[in-house]
Image (cartoon, rainbow, N blue to C red):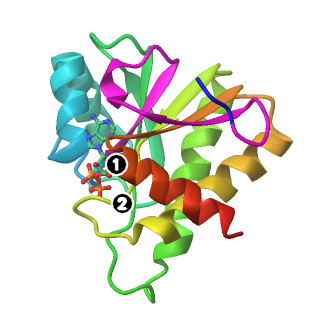
C-alpha cells in the first residue's frame, strides 16, 4: 500500500468490501436499511447481521432515519473488517444547501467513531460522489482535508484509506488534492 504525505493516509484502487481493515465506511442513506452502490455491496458482502443491527439503530437512536453528516457503527458481519461505520453524505443540489459542510461532517464523524473505538485502520469510499452527484474533485478536497486535520490531532485511526473502484477516480482524487 502506498501512503501519501505521511504514513497515515493512503489512496487505493479496489473493492471496499474485500479489505482487511478494522472498519469500512458505508455511504449509506438516512434509512440505514441498505440501498444501491457501495451500500448494497456492503450489505451483500456482510450478510444479514448488519441489517439486523441497522434495524435496531432505527428503532432506538434514529426512528426517523439518521441525518446526513452523522455516523453510526455496526458489525461488519461476514466481511474481513470488524466494523462498518455507516454515514450519510449530502445529496448534491448545486452547492448552496450546506453540501460541503455536511460532507465534511460525514468524514469527521466517521473518524470520531473510529477514534472512540481505537480502530487501527478505516477505509472510505468516495462518499456522495455516486448517485448523490457531489462533484468528485470538490469531494476529494473535502475528504482529504478532513482526514489530514483529524489525523493531526488524533492518534486513531492509525491508517485512513481512500478506496476507489477505478484508476480514473483515483487519479481525479489525487489531481484535486494536489491543487491545494
Ligand atoms: P452515494 O449515494 O453517497 O453517492 P454511491 O454508493 O452511489 O454513494 O457511490 C459512492 C462511490 O463509491 C462511487 O464513486 C462508487 O463508484 C464507489 N463504490 C461503489 N461500490 C464500491 C466498492 N465496493 N468499493 C469501493 N468503491 C465503491
Question: How many residues crowd around disc 2 within 10 Å: few (fewer than 14), some, or many (20 or more)?
Answer: many
Find residue 10 and report its image quarter. Answer: top right
Closer to the camera: disc 2 or disc 1? 2
Q: Return the residue at label 1.
A: 62
Furthest residue toward right:
153
Q: Is mark 2 within 8 Å of ligand 1?
A: yes
Q: Earlier in the sequence, mark 2 or mark 1?
A: 1
Residue depicted at 27% across the width and 50% down the height: 63
> Rounded to the nearest whole Å, what is the CA distance between mark 2 and mark 1?
21 Å
User: Per the image, is 20 magenta?
Assistant: yes
Mark 2 lies on a secondary structure that is loop
The location of residue 134, given as percent across then percent down, is 37, 70
Q: Is mark 1 within 8 Å of ligand 1?
A: no
The location of residue 162, given as percent across then percent down, is 51, 40
User: Per the image, is 105 magenta?
Assistant: no
Magenta span = 4-27
Q: Is residue 103 above or below residue 56?
A: below
Mark 1 lies on a secondary structure that is loop
Q: Nearer the viewer, residue 95 or 4?
A: 4
| Residue 141 at least partly seen | no
Q: Return the residue at label 2.
A: 128
Is 123 left or right of 32, judged from the image as shown? right
The location of residue 102, given as percent across then percent down, is 50, 67
Which of the image's four quarters has the N terminus? Answer: top right
Residue depicted at 21% across the width and 20% down the height: 45
Is 144 left or right of 133, judged from the image as shown? right
Find residue 38 and report its image quarter. Answer: top left
The location of residue 65, given as percent across then percent down, is 28, 54
| Residue 145 at least partly seen | yes
Find residue 59 and report its image quarter. Answer: top left
Question: How many residues crowd around disc 1 within 10 Å: few (fewer than 14), some, or many (20 or more)?
Answer: some
Residue depicted at 36% across the width and 60% down the height: 128
Amino acid at each position: 500500500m502506498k501512503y501519501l504525505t505521511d504514513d497515515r493516509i493512503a489512496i487505493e484502487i479496489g473493492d471496499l468490501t474485500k479489505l482487511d481493515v478494522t472498519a469500512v465506511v458505508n455511504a449509506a442513506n438516512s434509512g440505514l436499511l441498505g440501498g444501491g452502490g457501495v451500500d448494497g455491496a456492503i450489505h451483500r458482502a456482510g450478510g444479514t447481521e448488519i441489517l439486523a443491527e441497522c434495524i435496531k439503530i432505527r428503532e432506538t437512536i434514529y426512528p426517523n432515519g439518521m441525518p446526513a453528516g452523522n455516523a453510526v457503527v455496526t458489525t461488519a458481519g461476514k466481511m474481513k473488517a470488524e466494523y462498518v461505520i455507516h454515514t450519510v453524505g449530502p445529496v448534491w443540489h448545486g452547492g448552496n444547501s450546506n453540501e460541503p459542510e455536511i460532507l465534511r461532517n460525514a468524514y469527521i464523524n466517521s473518524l470520531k467513531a473510529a477514534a472512540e473505538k481505537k480502530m487501527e485502520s478505516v477505509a472510505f469510499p468516495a462518499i456522495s460522489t455516486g448517485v448523490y452527484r457531489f462533484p468528485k474533485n470538490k469531494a476529494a478536497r473535502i475528504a482529504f482535508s478532513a482526514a489530514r486535520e483529524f489525523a493531526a490531532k488524533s492518534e486513531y485511526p492509525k491508517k485512513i484509506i481512500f478506496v476507489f473502484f477505478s484508476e480514473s477516480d483515483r487519479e481525479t482524487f489525487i489531481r484535486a488534492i494536489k491543487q491545494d
